[in-house]
Image (cartoon, rainbow, N blue to C red):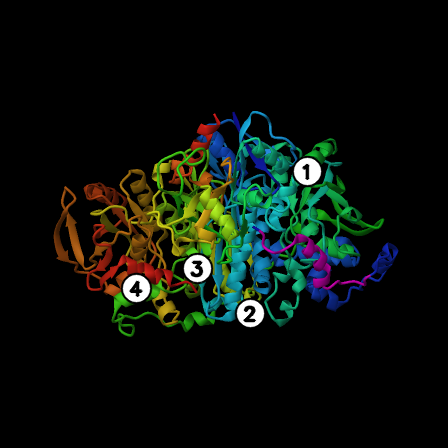
Amino acid sequence: MKAGVVVFPGSNCDQDCFHVLRNVAKVETEYLWHRDATIPSDVGLVCLPGGFTYGDYLRVGAMAHVSPIVRAVKEFAARGGFVIGVCNGFQILTESGLLPGALMHNDCLKFLCKTVPLKVERHAAPWTDFEGEVLRVPIAHGQGNYYIDPDGLERLQDNGQILFRYSDPDGDVSKETNPNGSVDNIAGITNEKGNVLGMMPHPERCSESELGNTDGLRIWESVLGHCR
Amino acid sequence: MGRGVFPEDLCVFAPLRFKPLFLKTTERTAMVEALKNDPAMTPELIAEHGITPAEYDKILQILGREPTFTELGIFSVMWSEHCSYKNSKKYLKKLPTRGPRVLQGPGENAGIVDIGEGLAVAFKIESHNHPSYVEPYQGAATGIGGILRDIFTMGARPIALVDPLRFGDPRSPKNRHIIGGVVKGIADYGNCVGVPTVGGETHFSRAYNGNPLINVMCIGLMKHSEITRACASRTGDLVFYFGNSTGRDGVHGATFASQEMSEQTQAKRSAVQVGDPFMGKKILEATLDLIQAGAVEGMQDMGAAGLTCCSCEMAGKGDAGVVIDLDKVPQRAADLHPYEMMLSESQERMLAVCRPEKLDEVKRLLAHWDLEAHVLGQVTDDGMMRVRFAGKEVAAIPAELISTESPEYDREYVRSSYLDSIEMFDEETHPAPKDLKKTLLDLLATPELGDKRWIYEQYDHMVQLNTVLIPGESSGVLRIKDTDLHIAIASDCNGLMCWLDPRMGARMAVAESARNLACSGARPLAITNCLNFGNPMKPEIFYQFKEAVEGMGEACAALDTPVTGGNVSFYNENQGEAVWPTPVIGMIGLVERPEHIATVGFKDEGDVVLLVGGPAQHLGGSQLYALLQDKWLGPCPTLDLEFEKRLIEFVLDAIRAGLVKSAQDISEGGLAVALAECCLKSPNGLGAEIDLAMEMKTDAAGTEGSRKRRESAARLDIELFSEAPSRVVLTLAPDRVSELEALAAKAGIPIRRIGRIRPVSKRALSIASVGEIEVSDLRRAFQSGRP
């Protein structure tokens, strides 16, 4: 089984995700180019990394979602393949309809880069099959303000699709712990089937002890454990 | 994560926003006709181009005839201060530029130092002061774009950005607008391209009203084998262009940077360029692909002075010449005159040279990134830079002579008269503040000394997964993947000290950068500098420049940190008022092992706090007076470079011996602010108990022995708020103190035990005769400093 990291012109966390998957999580990893129309059959996990695809001069993710690779990712997800979209990857997933909701400008209207506590709402396969109530994971985005209508939110809750919420270090979720204005402090959700995860925080940025934090590695190891 | 700016918009609006210089026609033939109507060489036209009558005579000599209009434009940018260093060269030549680690000194796009294991670091600092005043967002953004190109053009992947910024009084609405725009401009460009901003400085003073200093520094990593230089090599090699198309934006940017700001220059909006970070990212990746594939012989980015500077520099070495055909230049504005094409500073454009047989490979590599190679011409052997347009030769200049014959001035200087009227600190007339506790809190609550998180959180400082020490530490520290090596970066300059004494202030800037690196555990390697000064034609300003450059050279020689390049930014004046002389230092250091990285924050209860280094001197140049009383009080403290060198070696030895738990340089705000920061950056928010009046002895077990009152103690406010150089705060476990004392005795470095770290149950900083401040109160004050 291999992991594939999608590269669009303007991706800038592609090399980071590739590095963590290959050198830290020790899974064979290859780059998938935005013009590729298929996902190789031995790829079990596809990662849509952070960045500014095609510059994101249009609505974020709007150009990426019509690229050949995203069409292929949709088919891959429909077949049950695991897909993780981080940051800009999450924006592409909502734009392409693989995940519900939308990501708007942060309510502070500024780009924010800092490490924040995340409450893990569900410990379950494939993404969060580990112990640990609260993770510390860096965010780095200008448009991570998750919005969904009340009915949609109810569906997310009922189906257990909300995996991560912005919290305090003890796991308490409140308005004060919401960095960007997201509905219900949502930081990461899955699709109904659970094989597609979108999250604004960057697990690849906290996967190595040299960088002082390995909380993110648990997410990679969890899903890779279920791929193999 | 869009910025609400569409490149298409910029393209569409650029010609509308920027006033065309020439008649609007769509007929190509009419354009050629227009060439015949080029303005005649009048003294007024020559003066408008910033060319003196003597310089014009030299042009006549070089050409043996009158220049064409296009040639006049070429000379005006090539001989502007920005490109020729005509006013500064004499002094820059005296700076130490050699060292065992220097692989590339001044003269290329960036300096390069060897870091071992076959790896090298390219680094460079640039200013974007004037554009950022006129248009803060685009000015700062294109500053980032430009400095990134300087680095990747050398073959290095940019791994970090550092931004030394100086703004006017943040209470003024105009300055507030500039601050917001600049920070967002830096963030949007750097974040999009995916290069982390790992440090910098932000200062505020009315001395920068009307002329902020926006300096940007970039650091890149490369293998020795990937080093690429600008020069063209063989006759017949092809010169090709890729990246954005050429418009009218930025025509005369380099000459604009070489004038004082005034009502008139503000009207020169066309000198400001607009940035396109997506194209920046694409040409970054494409350039590195071209270099790694060995497909190119030389590479230049079309930054200041655009196509002109680029082709002159490519040709102007040896007998090499170049011929380019402007009809092949991709254009985004109608009816561009050759003059405009040669001078345009449209962003994100590259010029490169390849062997003819490599052109197909070049095209293939560029196509991967949706880019096209436009072959403009080729390298020749007649030493001439020839420019063709519509079948005509519009410029033919002996390329080498543009640089070898460029003017060099020995500017007049005279000791600045204000230096005689500076109010000097005197213990009699400047009594201690009544409430020192309040003084400390007030200082922490200023924008100058307060928390800069509101700025650096807008910058992606983690992308690329190398950032080990994030902004807010003594220096930014990056790991080099697959090695034990770490690169540290510091940037410093205290403008007030330089104003009080340009020579001493510049020495202090170098010393402070080196001390900051040492406090992070890094050995200083080399510097780049950004010399921000007023109008060099004024002898009093030129005195500041000369003194500062000489002082910098002395410090670089003493501390073994050669100068690998930099930037001179003159004419930083508004309405005739010059900014503080501000020679910003960007310094690179090397940490050889990860366990040698030291941080600022207090670590463990019971650790001993030591004050290490020279005496407190006095309160001259202190922020205590500058910030709380708006007094620029002299004198500048003195700096002993030999002592500083020993101190830096001592700190590094102590860290490498595993003795040091935290290290903090004492600079702005003095010891008191340094201690407060040690508490604020402590992972557990630990406080300390400090007594500066006591001599505390340590017994062999490291527990505190006898105490007696110090006999030669300075006045407490001087001890606390002096900004004398060569001082650091170290903490270590009690049982290691005697080892450190032995090391200090051997190095001849005074150390003084001034206190110990308190338990978690007592999170407060207490200073004898000052009082006790809860760390939470320190934090409240620190965070309220946001303007």
Q: Which mark is residue B440?
A: 4
Number of the front mark, 2 or 1: 1
What amino acid type is highlighted by mark number 4? Answer: Leu
Tell me, yes or no, whether the two marked residues, 3 and 1, touch with CB atoms within 8 Å: no
Residue under label 1, please give it: B366
Q: Which chain is indicated by disc 1?
A: B
Residue occupying image coordinates x 78% and y 49%: B326
**Horizontal relation, residue B510 to residue B173: left or right:** left
What is the spatial separation of the Cα atoms under label 2 and label 1, in whole angstroms? Answer: 44 Å
Q: Residue B575 at what x, y percent from top left?
A: 56, 72
Number of the front mark, 3 or 4: 4
Residue occupying image coordinates x 49% and y 57%: A107
Q: Secondary structure at mark 4?
A: helix
Q: Secondary structure at mark 3?
A: helix
Residue under label 3, please give it: B503
Query: Mark 1 and mark 4, same subunit?
Result: yes
What amino acid type is highlighted by mark number 2? Answer: Asn
Closer to the chain start, of discs 3 and 1, is 1
Closer to the chain start, of discs 1 and 4, is 1
Q: Bounds of the magenta span?
A: B2-24
Residue occupying image coordinates x 60% and y 54%: B142
Q: Residues within 10 Å of mark 1 (few under 14, many from 20)?
A: many
Q: Which mark is residue B574?
A: 2
What is the spatial separation of the Cα atoms under label 3 and label 4, in whole angstroms? Answer: 29 Å
Question: Residue B110 appears in which quarter of the rendering?
Answer: top right
